[in-house]
Image: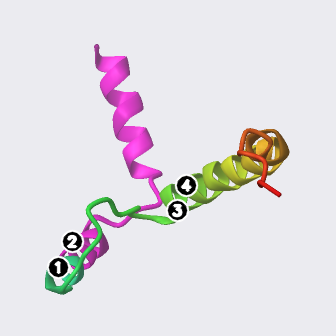
Amino acid sequence: MHEALARSADAAARQVGDPARMAQALVALADMPSPRCAFPFGSAALTGIQNARSDQRKELRRFAPLSASTDHTKAT
């Protein structure tokens, strides 16, 4: 148990995010007229989302012809 706590504390000490800056961002979001419901706090979260979306776009492009092939043919 002590090893797990030590690993957790070590990981927290190496985190990129600054809790005080996150709090400031939360206040800024709260002051916005239409804030996002889900917000990526930190560069690591942002990069992860960007990478996932990039992979999704590649997958959509890959299957776009097959997807479009299911449309009705135009009547002449």
Quarter of the view holding residue 29? bottom left
x, y percent for residue 33: 18, 86
x, y percent for residue 36: 29, 69
List the residue tagged with mark 1. Answer: 27
As measured in the structure, the alpha-carbon distance from the residue carrying label 1 to the one carrying label 4 is: 22 Å
x, y percent for residue 37: 26, 62
The secondary structure type at the circle numbered 3 is helix
In the image, which is nearer the foreground, mark 2 or mark 4? 4
List the residue tagged with mark 3. Answer: 46
| Circles 2 and 4: CB atoms closer than 8 Å | no
Residue furthest top in the image: 1
Quarter of the view holding residue 72? top right
Disc 2 residue crowd, few under 14, some 14–19, many 20+, Cα 10 Å: few
Label ID, residue 23: 2
As measured in the structure, the alpha-carbon distance from the residue carrying label 2 to the one carrying label 3 is: 17 Å
Q: Disc 1 or 4, which lies upstream in sequence?
A: 1
Q: Disc 2 or 4, which lies upstream in sequence?
A: 2
Quadrant (top left/top right/bottom left/bottom right) for the C terminus: bottom right
The amino acid marked with disc number 3 is Leu
As measured in the structure, the alpha-carbon distance from the residue carrying label 1 to the one carrying label 3 is: 19 Å
| Circles 2 and 1: CB atoms closer than 8 Å | yes
The secondary structure type at the circle numbered 1 is helix
| Circles 4 and 3: CB atoms closer than 8 Å | yes
The amino acid marked with disc number 4 is Ile
| Circles 1 and 3: CB atoms closer than 8 Å | no
Main SS category, magenta section: helix
The amino acid marked with disc number 2 is Ala
Task: Residue 6: say if magenta.
Answer: yes
As measured in the structure, the alpha-carbon distance from the residue carrying label 2 to the one carrying label 4 is: 21 Å
List the residue tagged with mark 4. Answer: 49
The magenta stretch spans which residues?
A: 1-26
